[in-house]
Amino acid sequence: MFIIKHKKIFISISMVLVVLSILALLIFKLDVGIDFKGGALTEVVYKTFRPTQADLTQSLEMLNFGTIILQPTGDLGYIVKSRDLSDPEHTILLQALSLGQSTTTGEAENNSNPLSELSFNSIGPSVGQELTRKAILAIILISLAIICFIAFAFRKVSKPVSSWKYGLIAIISLLHDVIIPVGLFVILSHFYGAELDTLFVVAILTILGLSVSDTIVIFDRIRENLRNQNTIAKINFGEMVGKSLEQSFIRSICTSSTVILVLLALFFFGPVSTKYLALMLTAGMFFGTYSSIFLASPLLVLVEEWQTKNKK
């Protein structure tokens, strides 16, 4: 099959993308949101017109609340990210956002442009640290569960590639599927102000599950063809993997495409708060499908060829 014949090219493409993603992470870093470092998030909407970002920034700088990030949302709203605020500071912030208008119970009004507060969330530093710990623990536990499942599912596969190597290659593919979207998110964080929050962790965990599912489907087809080798023409391992890919290729592409179409619809037509989540999942699905077909299976063949070469 074309993929197996040119396996080194496809593996090289994956290696280049992973290296570029790691370089982006090292150079630009991830901008951590208030979910993990603590802080306050306020969302407001103006009834008639939205003041310019420059005017509001000037008013907010006079508060001496530290760094405050303003993000436009919708046609008339703003999302304001700041350090953790007390109740009096919260009221003062709303007054500044209303450009001097009177503020009562989260709502500021004048005759021409009333302002309403849609939401206010405050997370202390200790809560942010707890979320960080739980997020890391969740990712580790999910990864271990995937390794254990693959080791169990392929325990009877020993020739010509042992079962633990299937698991190892699946983990390599998972790292590929996570690192590249993370690199994309780093670029978005640096140039567009995207912040690492709980939705980012949700995206990573979802990518892990979706990606390994596609890889296991193809590996399972390889396993079945190896089991049936006695009833079909004897062919080498590379041809067997190529045959398995031919049997699974269309299914994998069609399944992933339907999910990607839904995610793109969420990105273009969904709320602002889920745009980065949809984009991360879209990238994860795309590269997860790529790795299952163009990375994991070719790596199996490469490992088998390396073993055969060392035996001679």
Image (cartoon, rainbow, N blue to C red):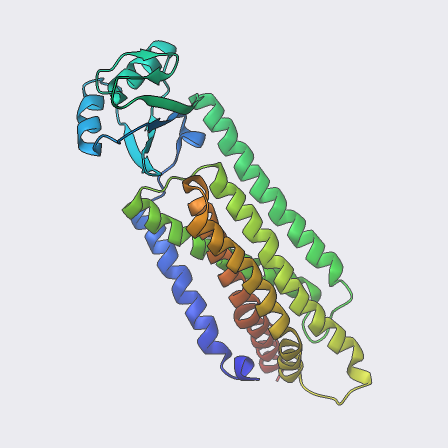
Question: Can you name the residue that lies furthest to the bottom here?
Answer: 233
Percent of width and height locating residue 271 = 44, 42
Identified at 58% across, 82% down, the residue is 309
Residue 12 vertical placement versus 284 (above, below): below
x then y, percent, for residue 56: 21, 27
- Nearest the viewer among 216 and 56 is 56
Question: Which residue occupies the foreground of this view, 301 or 99?
Answer: 99
User: Which residue occupies the foreground of this view, 177 or 253?
Assistant: 253
In this rendering, is residue 227 above or below 259?
A: below
Residue most extreme to the right: 231
Q: Is residue 59 above or below residue 2?
A: above
Quadrant of the image for the N terminus? bottom right
Identity of the residue drawn at 60% across and 55% down: 210
Q: How many marks?
A: 0
Is residue 219 in view from this perspective?
Answer: yes
Residue 152 image position (x, y, % from top left): 75, 57
Q: Whole-percent x and y of residue 99?
A: 22, 20
Residue at the location (65% across, 65% down)? 166
